[in-house]
Amino acid sequence: MPKEEIRLDEMELNEVNKMYDSMFGSLVSKQSYDKAYKSCKKNYKEMQKAVNDKIKPPSSMGRGWKYVRNIIYGWFVEDLFYELLKLNKNIKKIELTGNDKEHKIVYDYTTKKSTIAGAKTTFPDFLITLKNNERIYLELKTAAKEIYSIKIGNVKQLYKTMGESQIFSCIVMIDLVNKTYSIHSIEDFLNQHPFVNNRMEGQLCYDIPKPTKAFSKLIEEDLSRYIKTELFDIIDVKKFKYLNKVSDNKELAKIIVSKIKIDDLYFEFRFKEQEFHKTVNNIASKFNDIDIMNISWQEIFDKVDNK
C-alpha cells in the first residue's frame, strides 16, 4: 500500500490491527491495547453479520458500509488515544463526551435498519481535567491521505462548545500515514481563508499544517499551554455564551439563533462572491486586446461576421 494514502474503508480488520499496533503497541500496555482491539473486533463482526443479513447502514451520504468501517476503525483509534492520554502525568481525569461515546452500532433485524448508539450531543470526544484543575475538550480528527484540512463546521463547533460550556476546546489531528499528531485551537483559524474541498463533498475547509509530533510526545504534553482565556471574548464564542444564557427565554433565544444563521449566510455569501470575482478575473486575464468583461454579444457577432 503506498505511503501517501491509507484507505481505511477498504482495509480488513487484521490489516488495521497491524497498522495500529505499530503506532500504539509500544506506547500502551498490552492489556490496554487488547481491550481496544477486542471492542473493535466485536463491532466489526456485528457489522459483517448485518451486511450478510442485508441490514441498511446508518446514514452515510451514500458511502454505505465503507462509512461504517471508517467509524469502527475511528473508534479503535479513539480507544487507543484514550489509553495514551491516561499515561499523561499532567492529566487528572478523562471523560468520553462525544455523541458516539458508547462506540456501538444498534442493528434492528425487524426493520432492517441500523443506528449509531448514543444521545445526540454537540460536544467533542474527550473532556480532560488537568492536575491544576483546568479543563479542556479535545476532538479527534484523522488524516489518512497526507491531506490535512478541517471542515469549517468543525471549527464552528469549537466556538459553540466554548460558548456553551465555557471550557476551552481544541482539535487533535492524527496523521495515520506518518504516525504523528498536532493540536489546534480556534486561534489557528481566525485569520484563515477557507477553501472548497472537493475531497470532502465540496464543503468549505481550513488547511492545517502537517502534524509533526510523534505519538510518544502525547504522554508528556502539557495541554494547559493551549488554553488562552482571551479567546472566550471573541464574538463567535460569545454568541453561543449568550444563547446559552437565554435558554429559558424563547424570544431572546430566537433572536440570537436567527442572527447566528444570518451571520453564517453572509459569511458563505462573501466567500462565494470572492471566489466568483477570482474566477472571472482569471478568465479575463487571458485576453490582452479585448475587454472580455464588457464586450457585448453584438460586438462578438460582428467580429464573427467580419472575419
Image (spheres, rainbow, N blue to C red):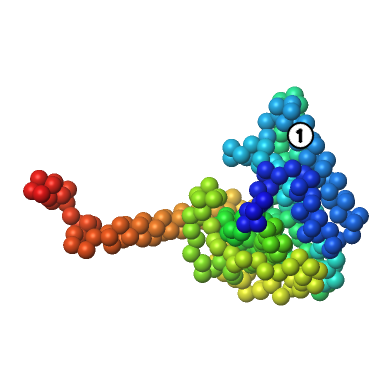
For residue 49, what is the image quadrant? top right
Tell how many labels: 1
Q: Amino acid at mark 1?
A: Gln
Quadrant of the rendered image containing residue 270: bottom left
Q: Is residue 223 visible?
A: yes
Q: Residue at x 67, y 43 (%)?
A: 10
Residue drawn at x 78%, y 64% is 128
Residue ranking furthest to the top: 110
In the displayed image of the protein, which residue is found farthest to the left? Answer: 306
| Vertical order, 95 against 188 (above or below) | above
**Other-residue count near label 1 (Cα within 10 Å), few / some / many at <14 / 14–19 / ≥20:** few
From the viewer's perspective, is 280 left or right of 12?
left
| Nearer to me, 239 or 220 | 220
Element assignment for label 1: helix
Instruction: Determine whether 113 is above or below 298 in the image.
Output: above
For this orientation, the residue located farthest to the front is 1
From the viewer's perspective, tell me whether residue 67 is left or right of residue 256: right
Q: In the rendered view, does 46 fall on the left or right side of 153?
A: right
Quickly name the residue at label 1. 48
The answer to whether residue 141 of the structure is visible from this angle is no
Q: How far from the left and from the top, in percent, is residue 304?
A: 13, 47
The spot of residue 159 in percent (x, y) is: 61, 62
- Indicate the position of residue 118 as horizontal and vertical percent values: 75, 44
- Point 67% across, 69% down: residue: 212
Q: Is residue 24 left or right of residue 294?
A: right
Q: Nearer the viewer, residue 146 or 195?
A: 146
Q: Nearer the viewer, residue 50 or 147?
A: 147
Which residue is painted at 83% across and 48% down in the image?
Answer: 37
Nearest to the observer: residue 215 or residue 3: 3
